[in-house]
Structures are given as structure tokens and as C-alpha cells.
Image (cartoon, grey):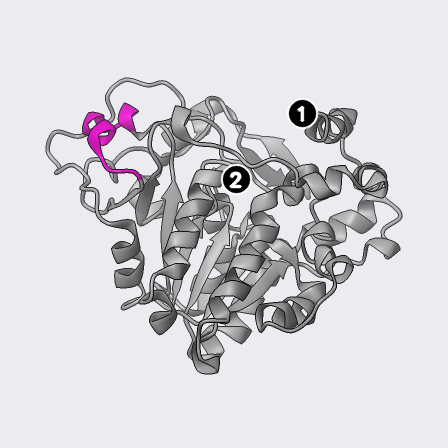
Amino acid sequence: MVLVGSLITCPAYVSPQLPAAIPENPVDVVLEAFRTHPIVALGEGVSHGDETAYQFRLALIRDPRFTQTVTDVVVEFGSARYQDTIDRFTRGESVSENSLRHVWQDTTQPSQLADATIYQDFFRAVRSLNATLPEGRQLRVLLGDPPIEWERVTTPSDFSHWLQQRDSFPAGLIQREVLAKGRRALLVYGQMHFQRRQFLTNYDMSSPLAETIVSLIQKDAPRSVFTIWPISDLEKFQPDVASWPAPSVAKIRGTSLGAVDFAVFRPANEPRMGVEGGRLVPIPPDKWKSLRAEEQLDAVLYEGPRSAISFARTAPSLCADPEHLSLRLRRADLAGLPPSESERLRHACSR
């Protein structure tokens, strides 16, 4: 998973020649976007585990207009290996807890992030919602994480094979199961998967490693995805944001917010890399390119001040399972993660 870091502190970025971005009802903006785009990509939150953004997602899917418009929800926090399991579960069929937990426990992410309560709770919320709907309007949840077979992963190289598919696999899934069938889907992922041009490669898209879910989809279906990015500390770029209702969504094209350099939404001095001779090499800061935010995203989601955003913890049932931590630690080692990740795993269940 790619995390969105805090914003850098910077002087005024707002252009006085352009109008300010205007907050709108977030559910209305999403539904309006579906009139012109088969895919609306809604960032998971200011970082993974964002419980405040999760509450908005629940309000969104529970709005009666949503299931009249949208057929699918594509999520990052479930392994495609268990698509049949989640299909049966969300249809209301009997699925054991031991079978269900593989959906979020066996993704390509060996860290504790996938164990946060909000992920399994989302599947339960869709099941409950579908129980109130006629069969033709029930939501289908599509699991976007590559179908990794952990029992076959014995080296970091084995793990890398699956990790490299984290954008290409869901892009292909959306093309097959949504676009080719004339359906509409809400895409819920970490928003760096929504980049139209890859920031970390200095916006050079010549390497396959630079591709994202959105860049891949729009190669064959231009302008098919409307992207909404949760951004924290928006008040730094447009002071009146502090008075916006929370949550709000604001479209940014043609606004002063859309004119800012996208880099200001990333951590300060985040390195950028080029590919030379098959290797990643740092690009010096004086060679860094700029890109207007409106070329990278369509709208921002404001959740309120950063201090008001809450984050979910590891599900207590998993912390109480003596086998769970050993499973996570073993996979972190197989994936070649640093020792600090193992400490983070232990800490997640000790709070």
C-alpha cells in the first residue's frame, strides 16, 4: 500500500486570478460524476485506516440513489483469490468466519494495515445493505488485490512477483468486469494508485513500473475515471477551507486550488527516481518537473481538520488470536520487510 504523507509547509500557492474551489455535498458530487464517467475513484483516506473517510463511504453506499446508479465497488483491501467467497457472503449466503477472514488477511500486504476493523466491517455493511435490495440492484464487491498464493512465497523475489501486479491486476479486473459489461464502479484505493502521471518517476510514464490503475484504464478508455483525493490540511492552500462542512467535495479544475503544483500534496523532499539500465536512480531536485494538481486529480475530499480525523485499529479478534501475529511476522520476513515493520506489527496489538 502507498501511504499519503503530510503536506509540506509552504507559502501562498493560491492564484488570485482564479476562482477558489467551492465545497459541495460529497454524495451529490459522486453521483453527478457517474453521469459522465463509468468509474469514480474515491481515495481511501488521508492515509490507510482513515476511519473518518470510511464513515463517508458507508453514508455514500447507503444513499438510496447510489444503488440505483452503481453496480460494483472495487476495493484494495481484499485478495482476488477469494472473490467467490466475498460474492457468496455479500449475497447473504452462509460463510464461516474462518473462510471470510482470508479475504482481507491474505492480501499482498503483510503488514497490520489490512487487519483494521474498518475493512472487514465494510464487507459486512455491504451484506446488510444487499439484504434490503432486490437481486438486480445488489452491489457486487470486486476484490482488487492480486491473488497471491502465500503458500508458494518462499523468497522476497516470489513476493515481488505479486507486488508488481498491484496496479495492473485491478486495472484488468475493471476492464473485464466493469467497462466491458457496461457497468459502473466505485473504486476505493489509496489515492496514489489514481495518479494519471507518476510523481515518483518525475511524471515519466515510459517504464511499466510507473503505471497506475487509472493510467492503465485510461489508455483504452480515456476520460473514463473521475478521481477524488482526500487531502489533509487543505487550509494551507485555501484559507476558507476551515469553514467548509465536513465532509465536503470540491471540484478543482479551473480553480486556484487546481493550479497548485501537485508536489505540495506530497511529503517534503520525497525522492523521485528514474530508470537507467534497468535500475532506479535518484533524480536531482533541480531536474524535478511540476504538474498542476488539476491534471492529476479531479476533486478533493475534505474530512475536517487533521486533528478531527480518526484511524482504525487492528480488530480485537485478530489480536486475541495467538496464531495471527506469528502469521504476520512470518510473511513480513518472507516479503523482506525491515525489522521496524515487525515491531510495528507487535505494537499494533499492544495498544
Residue 37: quarter of image: bottom left
Return the residue at label 1: 351
Residue 152 % position (x, y):
87, 56
Do labels 2 and 1 touch, CB within 8 Å? no
Q: Is residue 47 visible?
A: yes
Residue 344 % position (x, y):
71, 27
Residue 187 versus residue 190 in the image, above or below: below
Of residues 34 and 324, the one drawn nearer to the viewer in this rendering: 324
Residue 91 % position (x, y):
58, 73
The kind of secondary structure element at disc 2 is helix
Amino acid type at image mark 2? Thr
**In the image, is 136 to the left or to the right of 226?**
right
- Residue extent of the magenta highlight: 235-246
Instruction: Tell me, yes or no, whether the highlighted magenta stretch contains residue 33.
Output: no
Amino acid type at image mark 1? Arg
The kind of secondary structure element at disc 1 is loop
Of residues 67 and 299, the one drawn nearer to the viewer in this rendering: 67
Disc 1 packing (10 Å; few <14; some 14–19; many ≥20)? few
Residue 323 % position (x, y):
85, 42
Residue at 45% x, 36% y: name it: 46
Q: Residue 201: give its label.
A: 2
Q: Earlier in the sequence, mark 2 or mark 1?
A: 2
Residue at 18% x, 42% y: name it: 22
